Amino acid sequence: MPREVLIEEHVRPILGALRSVPVPAKTVTDVTEPPPPPEPFITISRQPGAGALTLAHQLADALNAELPGDRPWTCWDRELIEKVAADLRLSARLIDELEDRGHSWIRDFLESLSLSDEVRHADDAKIYARVVQTIRALAQAGRVIIVGRGGVFITRNMPGGIHLRLVAPLEKRIEFIARQYQLTTEQAAERIRELERNRILFYRHFWPGLTLSPETFTLTINTAAVEMPAMVQMLVTLVKHSVPARRSP
C-alpha cells in the first residue's frame, strides 16, 4: 500500500474525531470586560503664599456641583497629616529632632496634635513612608485633591493624575501670607523664606535628583494673574475632559 494512503488512513479518523467535538457558542460572559478607566485625581504643588488651599477647596466645591458621583471630591492637606499621625499614634515631641535637620515642616503639621500611645522610635522616614502610602491609596481611589507632600512625585506614574503648580510673584505672596495670618510684611516675608528653605530640604531628602521643572506638571498657573473663579472654571473644564466615559449596562 502506498505511503500516502497509509498516512491518510491514520489521519482521517483523527480529523473526524476533532470535527465531532462541539464548539461552544461565544456568549457575552465569555468576553472579558476591560477594567474601568481610573477616576481622575489632582495634585497641587505650590510656592508658599500662592493660595493653594483656597483654590483646592473652591475647586472641590465646583467639581462636586458639576461632576457629582458616588463619592464626593475631597481635599487632603492637614487632613492627610492628621490621618498619618493618628495611624502612627504620634505626638509632636517625637519629631522635635527633625527640626534640627531642617524638617520642621513635619512638626508644623503635627505640633497641635495631642495623641497618646506614642511610637518612640518613629522617624521622618517612617512618617513619610506612611504619607506616601496614604497618598497613593487616595489617588488610586480618585476624586481627591492632594496639596503638597510631594504628591506630584508620589503619583507621577499613576494614571488619571492632573498635576498643578501654583506660582506668584514674591510681593504678592508676602501680601497673601500677611493677610491670611495677620502678620507684618517683615514677618510674612520671613515665614515664606522659612517655608521655602524647609521645602528645598524636604525634596532633597526624599526626592533627590528630581526637580519641580515645568514638564513635571500638567499645568502651571500664576495665581496673581488669574482670578480665582476663572482658575476654578478652567480646572473644572480640564477635569471634565479627563473623566472616564461610563459604559452602558
Image (spheres, rainbow, N blue to C red):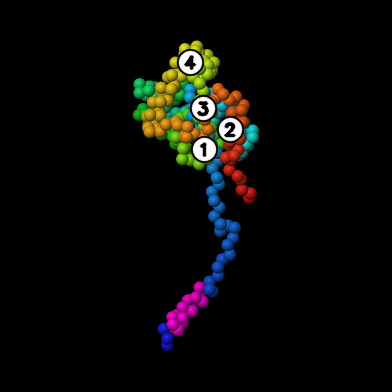
Q: Which residue is denoted by mark 1 in the rendering?
A: 161
Asked if one can make out residue 47 in the rendered structure from this viewpoint, the answer is: yes
Q: Which residue is denoted by mark 4 in the rendering?
A: 188
- Residue at 35 percent of width and 21 percent of height: 100
Instruction: Report the mark closest to the observer, 3 or 4.
Output: 3
| Cβ–Cβ under 8 Å for marks 1 and 3 | no
Q: CA distance from mark 1 to mark 3?
A: 16 Å
Q: CA distance from mark 3 to mark 4?
A: 18 Å
Question: Residue 140 at what x, y percent from top left?
Answer: 50, 40
Nearest to the observer: residue 170 or residue 58: 170
Question: Residue 44 at what x, y percent from top left?
Answer: 51, 30
Nearest to the observer: residue 170 or residue 153: 170
| Cβ–Cβ under 8 Å for marks 3 and 4 | no
Please tell me whether the stretch drawn in magenta is mainly helix, strand or loop: helix
Tell which circle, 4 or 1, labels the residue nearer the N-terminal end: 1
- Residue at 58 percent of width and 64 percent of height: 25
| Magenta extent | 4-18
Q: CA distance from mark 3 to mark 2?
A: 13 Å
| Cβ–Cβ under 8 Å for marks 4 and 1 | no
Tell which circle, 3 or 2, labels the residue nearer the N-terminal end: 3
Tell which circle, 1 or 2, labels the residue nearer the N-terminal end: 1
Q: Which residue is denoted by mark 2 in the rendering?
A: 235
The secondary structure type at the circle numbered 4 is helix
Q: Residues within 10 Å of mark 2 (few under 14, many from 20)?
A: some
Tell which circle, 1 or 3, labels the residue nearer the N-terminal end: 1
The secondary structure type at the circle numbered 2 is helix
Indicate the amino acid at tag 4. Answer: Ala
Q: Which residue is denoted by mark 3 in the rendering?
A: 166
Tell which circle, 4 or 2, labels the residue nearer the N-terminal end: 4
